[in-house]
Structures are given as structure tokens and as C-alpha cells.
Image: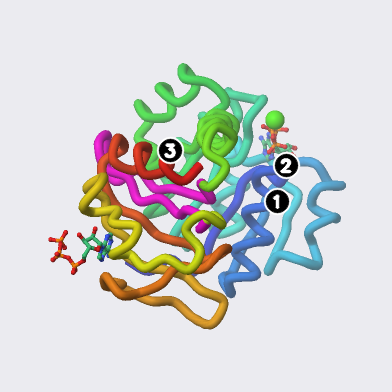
């Protein structure tokens, strides 16, 4: 299902950043916050922004929350409000409800009330930054499973001018380069003769161990 319209409950740092980005991407966003100042700040950015308490069912009904494809509960500190807003959005029939959790227990409660997706921004960003700090070439990564990862690695100077055949990542480590992003354009499914240059970005797929070994060899 394609998501078109989003309602965001809570316009703190997380909710407002999410809303701004969705607008940039061309989607419609209704922002809700009980704090008038927060709503003021975003009233010219979001499609609509309203001052309301999202723990009141009548309020959510009157703003037409059920017509949205996706609801995001971005309340953190007030866990009770987060849980109530989540249940109300689900009960109103919002198809997909995503909620931010500030702790494990908060997340477990949200799971019990049937939230479709839980986000732990601080925890997940901490994990991500740790990986990036210990591996300077790592720009970003996606965990495909416990074992497999896709990583974006910056090409260091020591690989500049070398072909994949020279570097031999598949032969030496077992990981494959699925794309090379160059300033001039992206090479999808590169072959042995394709050449790397400094500051290209390699997209590498493999097991965590294979990618680590490859990174060690170039870091
Ligand atoms: P962030 O880290 O994203 O800034 P936070 O985790 O500190 O947020 P809060 O500050 O508790 O979370 O909540 C984010 C926003 O949600 C605040 O602007 C707050 O006014 C709003 N909010 C809290 N409870 C409600 C509610 N019941 N209805 C509407 N908005 C609410
Ligand atoms: P393989 O069975 O490993 O693909 P091959 O002899 O068929 O070996 P070629 O396609 O000629 O291989 O590539 C030679 C070497 O260049 C490979 O062994 C591999 O290490 C490296 N190579 C080529 N393309 C890639 C790629 N997309 N990702 C990682 N390594 C590659
Ligand atoms: Ca916070």
C-alpha cells in the first residue's frame, strides 16, 4: 500500500524533523501537538498543524485522524500519552501506526497494544554511530538479517585506480560489490574491469564477517 497522508502526533525534535522531511518528499502531513508554540513553528511548513490533546478520542475523531494512511506517535517523555494516542489511532482505524519508544518497556507496551512499527531513535542512532566511529570508511549500512549486511563504504586512497579484479573482494573475502557510486553516475553490478577512484562509494553485500574483513584490509 502506498502511503500518501501522514498524521504526526507530537511535534518535538523527532516529530518535527519527520514532518519536514515528509513534506520535502512531497507528502501531505497533519501535525498535532498540545503545545501551541510547537504548532505555530510548523504551521507554515506542514500541510496542516493543529493544537490538540491526542489522548482525547473526540479530538482525534474531529480532526479526521481515521482518514490518514499512516499515523506516527512521536511523544516520548509522557509514556501514558504515547500509549493512549497509539491505541486511539489503532481503534479509529488508521491502517499503519508507528510509534517512538524511549525505553524497552515502553516498546513492549506499544507492541502489546498492536502498533505496527516501533522506532527507538536514540538507541538505534547510538548503534549506528558506534559502527561508523570504529570504521571510518563506513558511510551507512542496512542489516538484511542477523548475518547479512549491505554497507556503503567510501573508497580510500589505497584502492584508487584499482580495478575490482585487482582488489579482488569476492576472491579474498567473499563479499560482492553491487554498485559503485561515482560523481559521474552509478555503476550497477560492476564487473572485474571496473575501476575504483578515491571518494567513490562502494555498495557491498556479504556476511558481517566478510564485510568487516574487507573493511579492515582497507581501513
Ligand atoms: P523529542 O525528543 O522528539 O523532542 P520527546 O521524546 O522529548 O520529544 P516529548 O517532549 O514528551 O517527547 O513529546 C514530543 C511532543 O509531543 C511535545 O511537543 C509535546 O508537547 C507533545 N505531546 C505530548 N503529549 C501530547 C498529547 N497528549 N497530545 C498532543 N501532543 C502531545
Ligand atoms: P568469481 O567467481 O569470484 O566471480 P571470476 O573469475 O568469474 O570469479 P571475474 O568476474 O572475472 O571473476 O572477476 C575477477 C575477480 O574480480 C573476482 O574473483 C572478484 O574478486 C573480483 N570481482 C569482480 N566483480 C566483482 C564484484 N562485483 N564484487 C566483488 N568482487 C568482484
Ligand atoms: Ca526526548
Secondary structure of residue under mark 2: loop
- Cβ–Cβ below 8 Å for labels 2 and 1? yes
Q: Is residue 149 magenta?
A: yes
As helix, strand or loop, the secondary structure at mark 1 comes to helix
* Residue 78 percent location from the top left of the image: 65, 25
Q: Classify mark 3: residues with Cα within 10 Å, few (<14), some (14-19) or many (20+).
A: few
- SS of the residue at dot 3? helix
Q: CA distance from mark 1 to mark 3?
A: 38 Å
Q: Which mark is residue 97?
A: none
Which residue is labeled 3 in the image?
216
| Nearer to us in this view, 2 or 143 | 143
Mark 1 within 8 Å of ligand 1, using the beta carbon = yes
Task: Give percent across and percent down for residue 89.
Answer: 47, 45
Q: Residue 59's x, y, as percent? A: 62, 47
**Residue 186: quadrant of the picture:** bottom left
Q: Residue furthest bottom?
A: 184
Magenta stretch, main secondary structure class: strand
Instruction: Name which quarter of the figure residue 130 lies in.
Output: top right
* Mark drawn on residue 12: 2
Give the quarter of the figure containing the N terminus: bottom left
Tell me which numbered mark, 1 or 3, is placed earlier along the sequence.
1
Q: Which residue is mark 1?
A: 16
- Please give the name of the residue rendered at 44% of the width and 37% of the height, measured from the top-left corner: 118
Task: Pick whichever, 58 or 108, lies toward us.
Answer: 108
Amino acid at each position: 500500500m502506498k502511503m500518501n497522508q501522514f498524521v504526526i502526533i507530537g511535534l518535538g525534535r523527532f516529530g518535527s524533523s519527520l514532518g519536514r522531511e515528509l513534506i520535502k518528499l512531497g507528502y501531505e502531513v497533519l501535525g498535532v501537538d498540545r503545545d501551541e508554540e510547537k504548532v505555530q513553528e510548523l504551521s507554515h511548513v506542514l500541510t496542516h498543524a493543529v493544537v490538540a490533546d491526542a489522548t482525547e478520542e473526540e479530538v482525534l475523531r474531529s480532526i479526521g485522524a481515521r482518514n490518514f494512511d499512516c499515523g506516527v506517535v512521536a511523544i516520548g517523555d509522557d509514556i501514558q500519552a504515547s500509549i493512549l494516542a497509539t491505541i486511539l489511532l489503532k481503534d479509529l482505524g488508521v491502517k499503519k501506526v508507528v510509534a517512538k519508544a524511549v525505553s524497552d518497556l515502553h516498546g513492549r507496551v506499544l507492541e502489546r497494544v498492536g502498533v505496527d512499527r516501533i522506532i527507538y531513535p536514540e538507541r538505534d542512532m547510538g548503534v549506528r554511530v558506534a559502527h561508523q566511529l570504529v570504521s571510518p570508511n563506513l558511510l551507512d549500512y542496512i542489516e538484511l538479517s542477523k548475518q547479512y549486511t549491505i554497507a556503503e563504504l567510501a573508497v580510500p586512497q589505497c584502492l584508487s585506480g584499482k580495478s575490482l579484479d585487482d582488489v579482488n573482494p569476492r576472491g579474498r573475502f567473499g563479499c560482492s560489490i553491487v554498485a559503485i557510486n561515482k560523481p559521474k553516475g552509478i555503476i550497477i553490478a560492476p564487473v572485474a574491469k571496473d575501476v575504483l577512484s578515491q571518494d567513490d562509494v562502494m555498495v557491498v553485500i556479504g556476511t558481517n564477517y566478510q564485510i568487516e574483513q574487507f573493511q579492515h584490509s582497507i581501513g
